[in-house]
């Protein structure tokens, strides 16, 4: 692996430089990286091709989750830089979430030199088999002449109609090869045009104005401020109710928007919410149960009761606006004014956490939510908060909340970012804290520390199993030893405080928000 | 997912109980688990089927790495318990290492109910595509009647001629199904018989006694005490030299054994070691470079110069013994007596670390080694130590050292376990510390804290790239912020000390060894 001495002025680039320049010219300006030996020419090129900011993660799941958070907020891809099959494998869980979020990501995976693969050296693995399940597009660059076009194709695929993770494998010899002329992408890659189907608006309008009462189920762009306002107008005019999908990639909330709750997680209340109603999908998928439960249908609505206004990739907000106009719905229905919650003093409860955080949010905050303990109560409370954006765990692969907050903070340096995070799920990508400290990102992390996998104890109970038998309790309790979040946080260079009461949490949030020089962590001690 | 109320006495088990009882009866007695909702019936069954010890990991890579360490030491599989595709994905990197180590593992992955897969719910993914690259065997149980035989087949595959990871996917409805009669495995599953090919011994004997001088390259069972003693006898009698493979799954060392070095990692010294020699493979693969380098052959020895005495799965120790007798090699050649190193006082250096640790090892210690900074100097020094076993990173997927130490400690409660670990690689599975503390495993972790990815700086230099340009240095230095290992360790409930001098390290090791009630961590501050 000899890296050619580059002479950019003379028009020669390394292959890695071609990839980087192509991506940069297409608008990619951040690289969440955990490189190894086979990515060193790429690392070298980051110093010769200006305009892409590399951000180091100590673990690949941090990089892929950050790319997801970045892409959700920036609406364009970040690139990753991962080390062969095993490095990519460590990033799969959060790429799975990104796939479900339809987040564009340029997933760069280094590989052995092309002629080394046949030796089955220790790090050789079937990268394609590992990458396909999370990628809308996959290619391993085969020739130096293809470097620019393959990169452009990858970005086009990430931003295309299927939108998602495009995995581009770069053999190290093609990273270091000298490319004369240094040709880069022929044109800036643009996002696929987003539109909607007007004939569907007509059909839905007819159905809303007669027959079954409706539920509008919102996802994708329908959860923009405009989409939600239009949905609320339609609901007010027709007697429909509105829900957001249970785990939206991104939803606007508060600041006078209508209070559109998420469809409940557990099947019984979700079925009750949809029973006897026509379900209008606006950017959401047809609702199914999260898991299969005996005696409960997997489909939360019967196919014959479902009508699609807009697909997940469509301009669902435009479709809703058009629909609202079509049925003559009055303007300005159902906004919730910004108002502080009165929170009783005393020990912290999940409900109190939700309300205290809702009170504390500054304008245009971003809240990355992972874990049910405080996540649901916060969303219930946050309709009254100032305008903010919530980002949730779209694919159920836990370890998503902290890296998504990190990526969102990189994408939106002018906005305050919060991570409302359960303790169990925080552990999967705990290394996120170090990158937040390194990049001086003023993220406020709130760790709901109840020292258990609460959801699993709930699921044991649902299944008629005791949670207090020796092994079941050992496998769902995290209290032996208790994780010392203050020590852990300081270990990664993040100042931390502990709060056990409403008063202490309010004070800790004030303290954290007074600092803009880096992250802060608050351990919220819950019963 | 309703779990039937079990009545074991009446001969009814849950499907999970059938799997557990079958595995237990085949000798599987440990389950490294990170379960989710789809594994709750399995968790419940752990309380009704006695004899399998569940050990919780906060991250799946801890579980799979621990199963690797356990399997290397116990010679039989542990089981894992992982949550669908994303949970398995977090375990892939260490399963990759286990595959290279030929470690038997029963990799249990829960899945949705069979009839829920068609809905493509958020956690649905292509588990098979994710599992095949690291598995010697893969099956998703299709019918309740197959639960026992599929489990037995999986264990037989893990212990069979290909030896490795057998992935068994358990849909949650088949975990909770009531199985009348509760049939379990028909018979205890035994390891495939291990043997060697005597005609190869004859061929190698002829070649050793004439022609080119030879290198004996040892892997697998050749790195047992008996294998190494036989190899040293052969070398003394024929003028051959001996090397172990560079990254052995397990090698005995010290305690009067001959000093058999590992084949060098970098290609130039490895080529020099093998140049002009016949290479006799005894349980090792044909040597190839770790990465492809321009102008350097991928094969470290020409195929025509290689002769195989024993394949990796063979009884290479028996083959070497037979060969030594065949050529009439005298007994007892080349053992190195146990002797303390004199270590000059002063600031810690990698060489000093290696010697101080070699001096401190009690009899029958196990040393899990990950990272080159102190790993190579320790192995150089440890020929003089008391008898110990080393476990190394076989597949290059980093984050292997701490979990392998954890699994080895579970497998060998009577032996002291050390993890000699570089700081960068420790971060990938840092959650190992919590499980060590929870299980009160008296593991001594030595973290080589040099606050950089040293190997990457070396590789940049090899490639002619500067390591001190802004981005290259930011991507290879871990000093901003420095990780506070003492805080981090205490965060997970592990007492920790810091050592910057030879004297302090010796003292810290003495302190750590005086405790048997749980793990201890020593941060070794290196320049």
Image: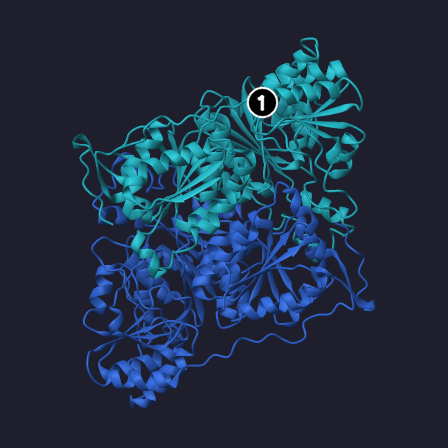
Chain colours: A blue, B cyan
**x%, y% of residue A78?**
57, 64
Q: How many numbered dots are placed on residues in this image?
A: 1
Q: Residue furthest front?
A: B199
Residue B482 against residue A67 in the figure, above or below:
above
**x%, y% of residue A176?**
74, 56
Residue A479 against residue B198 in the figure, above or below:
below
Give the labeled residue for mark 1: B196
Label 1 element class: loop
Residue beneath the point at 78% across and 37% down: B268
What is the quadrant of residue A378 in the picture?
Answer: bottom left
Residue A414 against residue B140 in the figure, above or below:
below
Chain under callout 1: B
**x%, y% of residue A389?**
42, 69
Does the rendering let one see residue B436?
A: no
**x%, y% of residue B446?**
57, 32
Judge the density around disc 1: few (<14), some (14-19), many (≥20) Cα neighbours within 10 Å: many
Residue beneath the point at 76% across and 27% down: B278
* In-front residue for pair B88/B299: B299
């Amino acid at each position: 692996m000899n890296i050619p001495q580059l002479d950019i002025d003379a028009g020669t680039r390394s292959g890695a430089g071609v990839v980087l320049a192509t991506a940069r010219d297409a608008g990619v300006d951040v690289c969440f990286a955990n490189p190894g030996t086979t990515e060193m020419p790429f690392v070298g090129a980051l110093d010769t091709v200006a305009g892409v900011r590399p951000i180091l993660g100590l673990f690949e799941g941090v990089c892929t989750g950050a790319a997801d958070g970045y892409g959700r907020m920036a609406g364009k891809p970040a690139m990753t830089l991962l080390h062969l099959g095993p490095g990519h494998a460590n990033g799969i869980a959060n790429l799975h979430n990104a796939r479900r979020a339809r987040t564009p990501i340029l997933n760069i995976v280094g590989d052995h030199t092309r002629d080394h693969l046949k030796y089955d050296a220790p790090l050789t693995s079937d990268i394609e088999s590992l990458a396909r399940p999370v990628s809308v597009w996959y290619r391993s660059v085969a020739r130096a002449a293809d470097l620019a076009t393959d990169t452009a194709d990858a970005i086009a695929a990430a931003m295309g109609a299927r939108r998602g993770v495009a995995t581009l494998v770069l053999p190290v010899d093609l990273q270091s090869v000298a490319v004369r002329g240094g040709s880069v992408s022929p044109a800036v890659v643009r996002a696929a045009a987003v539109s909607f189907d007007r004939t569907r608006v007509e059909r839905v309008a007819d159905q809303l104005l007669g027959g079954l009462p409706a539920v509008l189920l919102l996802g994708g762009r329908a959860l923009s401020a405009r989409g939600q306002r239009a949905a609320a107008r339609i609901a007010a005019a027709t007697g429909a109710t509105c829900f957001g999908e249970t785990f939206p990639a991104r939803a606007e909330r508060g600041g006078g928007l209508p209070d559109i709750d998420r469809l409940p997680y557990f099947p019984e209340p979700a079925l009750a919410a949809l029973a006897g109603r026509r379900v209008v999908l606006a950017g959401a998928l047809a609702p199914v149960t999260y898991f299969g439960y005996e005696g409960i249908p997997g489909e939360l609505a019967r196919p014959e009761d479902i009508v699609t206004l807009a697909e997940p990739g469509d301009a669902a907000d435009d479709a809703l606006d058009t629909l609202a106009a079509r049925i003559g719905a009055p303007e300005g229905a159902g906004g919730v004014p910004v108002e502080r919650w009165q929170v009783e003093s005393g020990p912290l409860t999940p409900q109190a956490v939700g309300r205290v955080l809702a009170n504390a949010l500054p304008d245009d905050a971003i809240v990355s939510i992972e874990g049910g303990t405080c996540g649901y109560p916060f969303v219930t409370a946050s309709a009254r908060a100032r305008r903010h954006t919530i980002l949730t765990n779209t694919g159920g692969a836990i370890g998503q909340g902290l890296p998504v907050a990190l990526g969102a903070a990189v994408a939106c340096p002018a906005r305050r970012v919060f991570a409302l995070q359960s303790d169990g799920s925080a552990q999967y990508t705990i290394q996120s804290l170090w990158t937040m400290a390194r990049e001086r990102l003023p993220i406020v992390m709130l760790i709901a520390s109840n020292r258990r996998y609460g959801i699993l104890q709930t699921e044991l109970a649902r299944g008629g199993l005791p949670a207090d038998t020796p092994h079941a309790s050992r496998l769902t309790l995290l209290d032996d030893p208790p994780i010392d979040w203050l020590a852990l946080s300081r270990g990664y260079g993040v100042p931390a405080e502990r709060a056990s009461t409403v008063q202490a949490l309010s004070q800790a949030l004030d303290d954290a928000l007074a600092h803009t020089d880096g992250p802060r962590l608050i351990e919220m001690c819950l019963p």
